[in-house]
Image (cartoon, grey):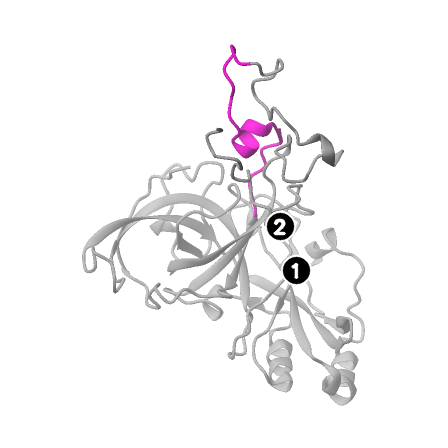
Amino acid sequence: MPQHGHNRPRRGSMGFWPRKRASRIYPRIKSWPKIEEIKPVAFAGYKVGMTHIFIIDNRSKSSTRGSEIIVPVTVIEVPPLKVAGIRLYKLSGDGYKTLTEVWSTNIDPRIKRKVSTFSIKDADKKIERIENELLSEISLIKLIVHTQPWVAGIRKKTPEIFEIPVGGDNIEEIWDYAKSKLGQNLLINEIFSEGEQVDVIAVTKGKGFQGEVKRFGVKIYPKPHKHDKRARGTQSKGAWGYHRILPTTPMPGQMGYHRRTEYNKWLLKISDNPDEINPKSGWPHYGLVRSTWIAIKGSVPGPAKRLIIIRKAIRPNNSIPTEAPKVTHISLHAKN
């Protein structure tokens, strides 16, 4: 009888299928949490690297509660996002449809490197028309924001642009908030606080075209075995009766550069002082942190300099404390 009985475990999760390259280098967000506060539900930052910190454990059911422990953290630089526009949606039978949009008159000219089809003419007239005619039809309001990599320690001129919805239930109050933020900077302190749970969405590190052994962990057969001149691969692709190869069969293909979401990461620290985290020689593959940074417990998908979307926790874990622990020491020796 085979090692696993009549049936072996499936190799790889069908929850991540197809395993193909992401459509773009920063992720598209498909679902957003509902919050009562009138503020954006997400932010973005650039991954710097990993290190470790010493904290006083404040988890209620931990065996080390009250003691000093070492925690691995990921450092993400979060320069301000600039609100370039507001997009309004109407709920129809086919889902949300774009009703109209308003762009800021003092928009950064570097955004034209990313998009060129927008109009900033008659912004005041558009706002007046929305308030007088369209406000009753609006079901969803999103901020069109773009990153400012030139504020961070990243040498590039082209910003990333994406949408962030605003929480709350009252459309008029949400519209007033969005209108007040049009053309202004958005800071991470306005959205998140220390000790909060967040979801991180990013595109993982690309590893290129790989075989079955590295991609799915199939067995490497020894040379004396009758492996049909192939040791590093699946021996049988499937039964004859199917006349096709099932999608669950391990096959070579793209590995990495996938859009992935990690839930309920613990936001331990938010700081405006880069000197607290910068090594003397800078971070490997990144350089020096020059603006606001945050520390998230554990690892985060993607390589250094990749844009990470930080979202309000959509399904928070009750066992994680809502208060941030006391940080006693931050290591300046990068681990990546």
Residue beneath the point at 25% across and 65% down: 60
Q: Is residue 326 visible?
A: yes
> What secondary structure predominates along the stretch shown in magenta?
loop
Q: Nearer the viewer, residue 144 or 92?
A: 92
Specify the amino acid type for callout 2. Answer: Tyr
Q: Residue 26: which disc?
A: 2
Q: Nearer the viewer, residue 17 or 316?
A: 17
Q: Nearer the viewer, residue 206 or 154?
A: 206
Q: Secondary structure at mark 2?
A: loop
* 271 relative to 25 in the view: left or right: left
Residue 335 in percent (x, y) is at 38, 38
The disc, 2 or 1, on the residue closer to the chain's N-terminal end is 2
Where is mark 1, residue-wise? 162
Magenta segment includes 206: yes
Residue at the farthest front position: 1
Q: Is residue 206 above or below residue 162?
A: above
Q: Are marks 2 and 1 in contact (CB under 8 Å)?
A: yes
Residue 221 in percent (x, y) is at 52, 19
Q: Secondary structure at mark 1?
A: strand
Specify the amino acid type for callout 1. Answer: Phe
Residue 167 in percent (x, y) is at 56, 75
Q: Is residue 45 above or below residue 125?
A: above
Q: How many marks?
A: 2
Q: Which residues fall within the magenta stretch? A: 203-225
Q: Is residue 244 visible?
A: no
Residue beneath the point at 39% across and 36% down: 281
Q: Quadrant of the C terminus?
A: top left
Residue beneath the point at 52% across and 35% down: 6
